[in-house]
Amino acid sequence: MATMFVRELSISVVLSRPGTEVLAVQILRFAEDGLWGKLSALGILMIFFSTALVIMATLIGARLSKVEN
């Protein structure tokens, strides 16, 4: 899993241009610049939105499985 993340991040870093960075690249830049507050805030937002999407997908899946039965 960690190898997959490192591979994905390095590809994102190489392909990114100013203004078109993905979140992983922006988090890496914040870490390199020592902007720990911004890095933490972005990380928390990323966790919040990811959790919300997982909950929504779970609820939609549960509702669809009830309709099929």
Image (cartoon, grey):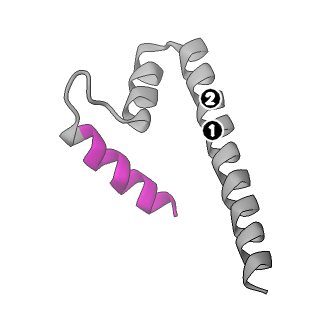
Residue plotted at (63% across, 38% down): 49
The amino acid marked with disc number 2 is Leu
Residue 54, horizontal then vertical, whole percent? 67, 54
The residue wearing badge 2 is 45
Depth check, front residue: 55 or 15 = 55
- Residue 5: in magenta span: yes
In the rendered view, would you say 25 is above or below 30? below
* In this rendering, position of residue 21 left or right of residue 42: left
The amino acid marked with disc number 1 is Phe
Prevailing secondary structure class for the magenta stretch in the rendered image:
helix
Picture quadrant where residue 58 is located: bottom right
Q: Which residues are magenta?
A: 1-13
Depth check, front residue: 22 or 33 = 22
Residue 64, horizontal then vertical, whole percent? 71, 72
Residue plotted at (42% across, 30% down): 28
Depth check, front residue: 55 or 23 = 55
Residue plotted at (40% across, 52% down): 6
The residue wearing badge 1 is 49
In the rendered view, would you say 36 is above or below 8? above
Q: How many marks?
A: 2
